[in-house]
Image (tube, grey):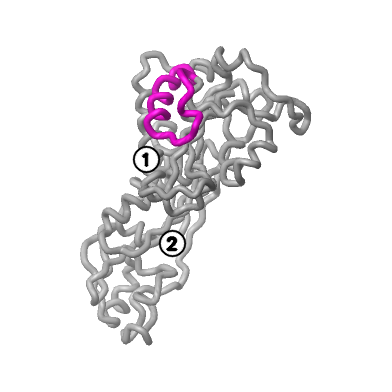
Amino acid sequence: CDASNRTSMAPLRCGGPQSILETDHMRIRFAGGSVSGEGEGQRLRHPGGAESRVSRSLGDRHWKDTQATGFKSPLVVGVPEVSHSILKGADIHPFLLLSASSVASAMQPQELVDIGGEYLQQPRATCGEIVTRALGARAGVAQCTVLEVCFLPQRKSGDHKRRAPGTAGPEPLPSYSAKKAKIAMAPGGGTASIRLRHILMRYQDGVQKDGRQLARTRQEAEAALRKALGDLRNHLKAVKKAPKDATELVKATSEKFADICKRLSECETARKGGAMCGDLGWLTPEELANMGAGFKEVVEVLMPGQFSDIAVTEQGVHLVQRVA
């Protein structure tokens, strides 16, 4: 993704051409396949009816194994056709997306980048949304795979007093500041504990500590939390005066967060009232680790006010906001 424009994000292709190469047309026809369309709209058609947007890929046996298919030659080959780009840090290149050909054939590069920008620094949410849309567009495709690598901005002294990208900011609400943080010394000194509030959704196909069996799948739970993120984002856009720091940002999202938390969350903390709804309190690094590695690695990179990516634990899936 190239964000050098500052007002929009554009795809920057780092791998081989995501297309049907002219030099491959003869081989494709010889193998029994065909090519339809023009330019980026070209599709390689398998004799069985399946389509691919690329003629060079790691592929699978359905396209490449001549012994299994009986083709005279492979329809798709793995001969590398690569280019390179120099990445210039999180401000210019905030994330990298790697997608299977099944995803590339279902969605345009700009669509992928737009979703990555919508869920900035939230790779699980990004990949979940891309896969959901790709599967919807490619009915009958057994598998769609996508991976996102996010490049975090370099932290500088005093960053805890600045707004984080997207929904973030430096200070806690006054209602929180009246309570002191648990003291744990971070490297170089300072308080390492952080204050969080969360929304927890349980699901059936995961390991549940209490043994409860629910009808909801993990994919459905994650989809609900992605919608919650979208609702919170739209709520912030509708605020007349944009929050300038974390105090204002957390305050601006508290009412909407509490509404969603009471409606969706299956944690006891959802019963708390007002701005305390979903509150987990001050957590030290040790307490974060006790929540599970999937929880700790997602929340420990947050700046005050920022919403997390979707975290997966034995309890279920979480959407977390760092309050302080």
Image-quadrant location for residue 283: top right
Residue found 37% across the figure and 40% down from its top:
224
Q: Is residue 279 left or right of residue 32?
A: right
- Name the foreground residue: 121 vs 222: 222
Residue 193 percent coordinates (x, y)? 67, 29
Q: Which residue is mark 2?
A: 16
**Proximity of marks 1 and 2: CB atoms separated by less than 8 Å:** no
Image-quadrant location for residue 22: bottom left
Residue 224's disc is 1
> Between marks 1 and 2, how big is the CA–CA gap?
35 Å
Over which residues does the magenta segment extend?
250-275
Residue 52's disc is none
Q: Residues within 10 Å of mark 1 (few under 14, many from 20)?
A: some
Up-down relation of residue 121 to residue 279 (above or below)? below
Dot 1 lies on which element? Answer: helix
Residue 275 percent coordinates (x, y)? 48, 19
Q: Amino acid at mark 2?
A: Gly
Dot 2 lies on which element? Answer: loop
Residue 228 percent coordinates (x, y)? 38, 34
Up-down relation of residue 14 to residue 254 (above or below)? below
Q: Residues within 10 Å of mark 2 (few under 14, many from 20)?
A: some
Residue 292 in sight: yes
Up-down relation of residue 170 to residue 7 (above or below)? above
Q: Quadrant of the N terminus?
A: top left
Label whose residue precedes the other's in the sequence (1 or 2): 2
Q: Amino acid at mark 1?
A: Ala
